[in-house]
Amino acid sequence: MISFQDVNKKFSSAITALDSINLEIQNGEFVFLVGPSGAGKSTLLRILAREFLPSSGKVFVDEVDITRIVSSKLPIYRRKVGFVFQDFKLLDDRTVFENVALSLQARGVKEIEVNKEVERTLKLFDIWERRALFPRQLSGGEAQRVAIARAVIGKPSIVLADEPTGDLDPQTAAAVIQLLAEINSWGTTVIMATHNKDIVDALKKRVIILSKGKIVSDKHEAKYEFHREEEKPNEEVKT
Amino acid sequence: MVYKQFVLRNIRRTPYQALAALMVMFLTFLVISVFLIVAVGSQEILTFYEGKPQAIAFFKDGTTDKDVQAIENALTLTGKITKFKYVSKEEALQIYRDRNKNNPLLLELVTANILPASLEINTKTPEDLKDIATIVQKEPVVEEVVFPEDVVASLTSATHLIRLVGGTVVAFLVIFSTLIILMIIGFKIRIKRDEIETMRLLGASNWFIRIPYILEGLAYASGGAFLGWGLSFLVLWYFQPIMSQSLGEVSQVIFPISWIFIGGLLGVELAVAAFVGLLGSYAAVRRYLHI
């Protein structure tokens, strides 16, 4: 279970990215984080990824306060979490196969097992034929599939997706969401930040609306409802 | 295996930086090789001259064994002598014949009566030589005393100079090479900042990220050491006949170069390479990775 307890994040005295966040997410849930730019969606995900520390408050993942994990132990925590980004963050000088393999190599998995597992995963995500290509040779949808394959190959218990469909056309975006839903059906917790109303409405999952760093709505099997407080988005905070 | 792939990829992706690093390392280790060869060679030559009979006293005709013994006793009392060797007229003739066996004309003209008997005197240090020569010269039965004072003095100062200049140049190049490794690895880390950040998010440990960069620095230094070492011995092997001819009898203490020396030199250079490569790349990792 993931638990945010009175979490605040300030980047300066003028910029409050998260304001008194209290939130619980059960294992295996699919949660949409929605809200305008600067609402605090990415900041919340990055705190969960331990890229940032909150200014105050605690964040528990499986009863471990991740804000207290020392930097030398962070890699062990991060192996429980898979990341999918809007800009894919694939390594340009590595092939599809090497990009996906990196996730296991970083965990110290033996080469023979890496090769087997990468093959299995690439076939599962229908990108095996693209294994020798470099990221710049892929379409946006293919690149995002590779990024998702890389995120889940290590069997993380949580997948964090920050605007994963932001750069994709509607059809490709729908396919990516279907993929994330399938990953969620394996029991993986998926937390996805998005602007895409159609996707949120189609899936009917838990929807948390953020505005100016606060949770203004938290509903299960919900749609992305327009909220009055979204009219004045906070200052853009994407560091 | 994984690290090897990472290092080779890093080198392939930035070939010009890799080439620059390798060339600097090559130059450094070529200079280190040359310095060590010259330093060891000059020391061997100096040792050769220091170990040779340093003073030779030639006797007048009619000198008896008793006279020679008296001189030996007097010199022994100085405490500066390591060895005496008496060479009789007959032995001197034999030496002369051996040296000129290819020239019958010279052999015909010389008999034992022409050549003087002599005493070869070894001293503990080259500095003792002059005192001993002065003592021996005063003996009435001694015709002449010769000793290679100038050769030893010149060689001693040359050896000291080689060590000083060579050591300074090598120290400078080692520092310079370490900084070059630091700069190039640091540059590579900076241009791969996003990649490093992604690897961190994938759960890569600090050492998983650091090791390829450290090994890359080590690869440049070791590659440079092999090339510098190889070229220096290639040049030495090529010029060996010319050097043997110009050095004369001294060349026998240098050539043929022993395999132990060749292997030892490679060992020393690889040790220096490990120091330069590891220090430079580790400093870069500490400075630029912030992990």
Image: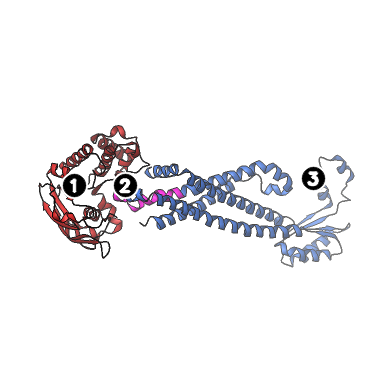
Chain colours: A red, B blue
Q: Which residue is mark 2?
A: A106
Distance between the alpha carbons at the discs numbered 3 and 2: 74 Å
Side of A222 relative to B59 (left or right)? left
Residue range (magenta): B199-217
- Location of residue B82 in the rendering, given as x and y in whole percent from the top left corner: 71, 61
Query: Which secondary structure, mark 1?
Result: strand
Distance between the alpha carbons at the discs numbered 1 and 3: 96 Å
- Please determine whether, in this image, residue B159 is positioned above or below residue A122: below
User: What residue is drawn where x is 83% and y is 48%?
Assistant: B93
Observer-nearest of B119 and B172: B172
Q: Which residue is mark 3?
A: B99
Q: Nearer the viewer, mark 1 or mark 3?
A: 1
- Location of residue B237 in the rendering, given as x and y in whole percent from the top left corner: 64, 42
Location of residue A127 (image quadrant): top left
Question: Are tags 1 and 2 found on a single chain?
Answer: yes
Q: Amino acid at mark 2?
A: Ala
